[in-house]
Image (tube, helix red, strand yellow):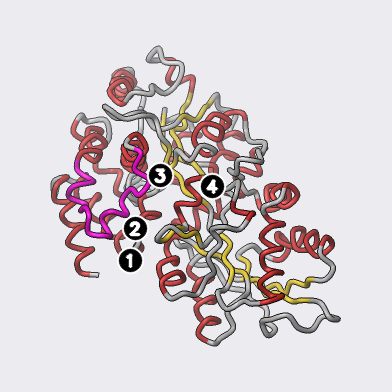
Amino acid sequence: MISNIASTAVSRRQALAGLGMASIAATLAACGGGGNSGKTTITYLSWETEEVARPLIDAFEDANPDIAIDFSYSAPTAGYFQTLQTRIAGNQQPTVHRINPETKEKLIGEGLVADLTDEPFMGAIADANLRAYEDDGKIYGASFGAWAAGVVYNRDLLAQAGADDVPQAWDEFLDLCKQLKGAGVTPYRESVQDIPSMFQAFLGAGYDLAGDERGEKKIFTGESTFAEEWPEPMKQWYRLYDEGIVGAESVSLTGTQLKEDFIAGNLAMFITGPWDLADIAASGLNWGISPMPAAPGGEPFATGAPDPGFAISASAQGEELEAAKKFITFLASQEGLRLANEHIGTLVNTSDFTVEVAPEYQGLYDDYLKTSKIYLPMNYWDHASDALQLEGIALCQQLVQGQITVEQVAAGMDTKLASL
């Protein structure tokens, strides 16, 4: 079911990149349990269009005839949270709305969202999703899906170096790249228009093996620094450049260019996620997708992140609050998750529900997405994540162009954090 994978990850991709789309928002009715023929009304600000979200809304209202949902829409990501902020400032916070890692600092810190920790609908949520919306031991967002990216590979090109798939050890991966390059095949390319995915996976694997659920959060509590956390995994990733496998062209390459190069048969491996799989499958290539190889002392891992969560306004009380909880309980139900996968494309990763995915993606879904073996640094940055991400990209671009060292990248991140 590649169409489901692709539609989900487009929204994840847009969320990560902060793409601005035109905001379409219906006028909100007053919050609270009034109107609508005696029904309890809750307001819901969605970032899926009404056409996409309507099947879930209708199913919930059919099952709960005493509750009406006043629906409005704003496109993710920047436009959505601008709309949400405007409504909060106008004392019209929606009863239910989205929360993501970039906005949780404000929403939780200012006491704007309710504590959901002990709600029954939280029981099957994956560990990574719980961690994403946790603060001081309490959970403020209910997230039911995630995405995971890995190394997509052309089986026929790998066969030219005697390989069946992507090696799961980093040294072996680098050796394969050199063998492919010696055979006249472009082995691997990446884009450094984001913090490199391979490096992110190395970070996550290290934390997972150490049983460290806090990851880079320690930097933001003063217990650690980027200078302590980043250099070792970054040095491993940078071997791609030190050993001549890729070069400074990574600065200008885009994800679209890599996909097109791969589909044309000119590239053996690159990193991508569900957003590209429909196009790759339609190309007719003999392909697969693998987790990131294990750095020395590490384990295979995936870059990825939980979906934005559903939050309840902290000001909701009485019947309105109970109706909001019923709505999220429905979203967490088997029927709600089925509809979310079918109509929104959610890659559900709860412990009580499994979706159908493309055969090539099955291993990544089962062994990494469903088991929370995914990592995205920005999910653990509790302050100014957008500014820090831009700084990290700029520093990584300077690194691959030979202008600074790995240690200077990490120091630059600490300097930037101190200035924010």
Circle 1: residue type = Ala
Viewer can see residue 190: no
Q: Residue at 20% x, 29% y: name it.
A: 243
Residue on which the image places disc 4: 146
Residue 224 in the magenta stretch? The answer is: yes
Residue 134 disc label: none
Residue span colored magenta: 211-231
How crowded pointer 2 is (Cα within 10 Å; few <14, some 14-19, many 20+) is rated as: many
How crowded pointer 4 is (Cα within 10 Å; few <14, some 14-19, many 20+) is rated as: many
* Residue 11, percent from left and from top: 55, 55
Circle 4: residue type = Ala
User: Do residues under tags 1 and 4 come within 8 Å of each other at their CB atoms?
Assistant: no
Q: Vertically, is 292 above or below 5?
A: above
Dividing the picture into quadrants, the one containing residue 32 is bottom right
Residue on which the image places disc 1: 384
Q: Residue at 60% x, 44% y: name it.
A: 350
